[in-house]
Amino acid sequence: MGIENLIAKLLASGADLSTRSAVRAVLSLMGEDEELADQIYIELKNRAYAEDFAKVPPEKRAVFIPQCLRNFRECQAELGEYGFECVKCGCCPVGSIIELGERLGYKQFYIAPGGSLVKKILKSKVPKGEIKAAVGIACWPELAEAAEKLSHLRIPLQAVPLLRAGCISTLVDVKRVEQTLSLGIGSGVRGSKVPSIESNPTPGF
């Protein structure tokens, strides 16, 4: 069963799907693969928060990019207070993602080497109103964990999963990142439609 059909089945059941553990429990009761829990949870959260996310101006949206997308052998970025500072050398998709965001009006990009730095960024900037929404790029478990934490902070998240996870040389669908960044910006479908998990991937590198 495809993810979209499985999500429809879960929604039709009327079960509680508000947390990762709840989604996992329902999948277990239905005899479905529990390993899909994080993926389904993220898709549900993306849909639930898309409208709130779209209302936030791009300069108040933070884009969290995993350091594993960097070409660690050739990366020229230096580690600063809030993560690696990309110089857009063209050796990995990070620079392209930042350029896409900048064209749309984004100002905040964080290439964080770990969760502790992400917490530091949120602790510093959310109370000041500098971050009111977030785009997260990561593997499924990390996205699910981030979604739970950000929901407590009332920060709408739009999550983009890595096509290939790991500690180095990961991949992301840059086209999907662009679609996500574009939510609420401009008019028509490009500005309002939540990218589908089952859309055709276009790896950046």
Image (tube, rainbow, N blue to C red):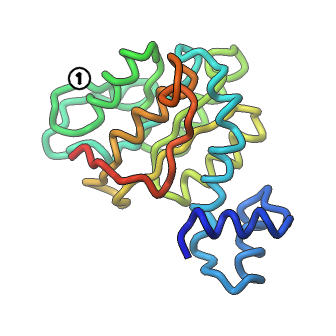
Give the left or right position of residue 146, taking residue 16 as reference. left
Inspect the image, locate mark 1, and give the three-letter code of the amino acid beneath it: Val
Q: Quadrant of residue 153?
A: top right
Where's the N terminus, which quadrant? bottom right
Q: Nearer the viewer, residue 99 or 118?
A: 99
Give the residue drawn at x 34%, y 48%.
172
Percent of width and height locating residue 65: 42, 38
Give the residue drawn at x 48%, y 46%.
160
Give the residue drawn at x 33%, y 40%.
174
Percent of width and height locating residue 100: 34, 24
Percent of width and height locating residue 181: 47, 29
Give the left or right position of residue 62, taking residue 132 as reference. left
Task: Give the residue pinned by disc 1.
Answer: 87
Q: Quadrant of residue 3?
A: bottom right
Residue placed furthest toward the front:
188
Q: Nearer the viewer, residue 160 or 151?
A: 160
Instruction: Estimate how packed mark 1 is, as few (under 14), some (14 to 19) or many (20 or more) residues with alpha carbons within 10 Å.
Output: few
Give the left or right position of residue 31, taking residue 170 as reference. right
Give the left or right position of residue 29, taking residue 175 as reference. right
Give the residue drawn at x 74%, y 68%.
10
Q: Nearer the viewer, residue 128 or 139?
A: 139
Q: How many marks?
A: 1
Q: Secondary structure at mark 1?
A: loop
36 shown above or below 147 = below
